[in-house]
Amino acid sequence: MNASCEIPSMAASSSPCCVECGAPVPSIVQRLGADSVRLARCESCGHVADKYAEFEPTLIVIDLLLYRPSAYRHVLINRQVLRGRRHERRGRRAAAARRREG
């Protein structure tokens, strides 16, 4: 059986996991070039690591109501990781803007 991701104690530093099989993945997205990214595939099961990364919130809620384990993995594990990285990018952009201003 694969080592599965543990539900973090709401720490943004935890690593993401595949929403289909629960195996840890290095990243949810792969950078293909300067301007292009795509969703990463899980090495264990071959599925997209987190299909919910591009879903509308309404569709995620529907899957939560249908008790889909993959939706719960996205919300409880990967969403915290994505949110933490988004805040890091915003901080870097703000610092760069401050440097440009003076």
Image (cartoon, helix red, strand yellow):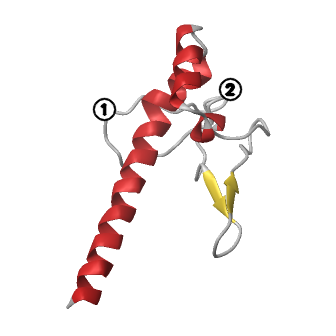
Quick check: 18 left or right of 89? right
Vertical arrangement, residue 66 with respect to residue 94, above or below: above
Vertical arrangement, residue 102 with respect to residue 60, above or below: below
Q: Callout 1: helix, strand or loop? A: loop
Choose top left, top right, bottom left or bottom right for residue 19.
top right
Vertical arrangement, residue 10 with respect to residue 89, above or below: above
- Give percent across and percent down for residue 15: 47, 46
Which class describes the residues within 10 Å of circle 2: few (<14), some (14-19), or many (20+)? few
Label 1 and label 2: CA atoms lie apart by: 24 Å
Could you tell me which residue is drawn at 58 percent across and 52 percent down?
Answer: 27
**Residue type of the residue flagged with mark 2:** Met
Please identify the quadrant where the C terminus is shown: bottom left
Could you tell me which residue is drawn at 57 percent across and 31 percent down?
Answer: 4
Q: Which mark is residue 9?
A: 1
- Give percent across and percent down for residue 33: 69, 73
Viewer-nearest residue: 64 or 81? 64
Please identify the quadrant where the N terminus is shown: top right
- Give percent across and percent down for residue 63: 59, 16
Could you tell me which residue is drawn at 51 percent across and 19 percent down?
Answer: 61
* Outermost residue to the left: 102
- Give percent across and percent down for residue 89: 39, 64
Q: Is residue 3 visible?
A: yes
**Residue type of the residue flagged with mark 1:** Ser
Which class describes the residues within 10 Å of circle 1: few (<14), some (14-19), or many (20+)? few
- Dot placed on the residue nearer the N-terminal end, 1 or 2: 2
Instruction: Report which residue position mark 2 lands on.
Output: 1
